Image (tube, rainbow, N blue to C red):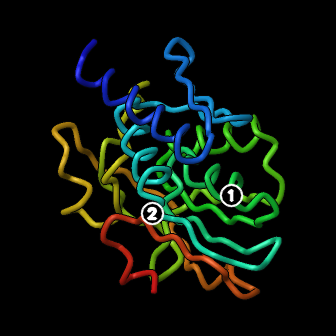
Amino acid sequence: MSVDDEKNSDLIEDCFNRFNIHIRFDENEKKLLIDQYVIYYSSKVAVIQTLDEVFLNMAYYFRTNKANPFIVDAGSEVGVVTIFFKLFYPGSKILCFEPHPCAFRLLEKNIKANKLSDTIAINAALANKDGVAEFFGECDSAEDVDTRGSSIIDTWGLQRETSSMIQVKAVKLSEYINQDVDYLKLNVEGAEQQIL
């Protein structure tokens, strides 16, 4: 058993023990099964790091008395956090933003595969103005692209050996908000100040 396989095994066991959540990988189809949910991914290393952050560290858990909290998931990647929100807050209304073309395709696929109601995905970067933004990161169309660290901030997005720049749609968050936000998740790799 490799070190990575051992880490995966520990993560899966910890999730089951803490939350009675079953996690299984199907590496042939590049998908992850979390209880009744399926998550298609491009990079196993990236999805494992996100699982650890989201499920074991509970980075995005919050308390609410609302049956249908309104959540903004900025930097949704393939939707692991979106699935987390639906698992812990099944009636939530979620607005997802993801500029990376590969990650967005998988995000849409995961929303559709899981029949996530009240979940909208926007293929755009959040910024301080509408238009077009330079987007830096691992932006090729390889099947195992790792979208972690991709950003409209070049010093964030150019950290990888195979980094490049593409142009993406940019939107202002305020244009999409017409009600109180119960939870604002901003995982936008250094662009938080531009958004707020």
**Which mark, by number, is residue 105?**
none
In this view, 157 is above or below 193: above
Q: Is residue 45 left or right of residue 105?
A: left
Q: Residue at x 51, y 72 (%)?
A: 131
* Residue at mark 2: 59
Relative to 82, 161 lies left or right:
left
In the picture, residue 111 is in which quadrant?
Answer: top right
Q: Which mark is drawn over residue 88? A: 1
149 to the left or right of 125: left
Disc 2 is placed on an element classified as loop
Q: Quadrant of residue 136?
A: bottom left
Specify the amino acid type for callout 2: Ala
Q: Position of residue 145 (x, y in %)?
A: 37, 33
Q: Considering the image in quadrants, where does the N terminus appear?
A: top left
Tell me what residue is drawn at x 67 percent, y 39 percent: 110
Q: Nearer the viewer, residue 51 or 177?
A: 51
Q: Are marks 1 and 2 in contact (CB under 8 Å)?
A: no
Say what secondary structure mark 1 lies in: helix
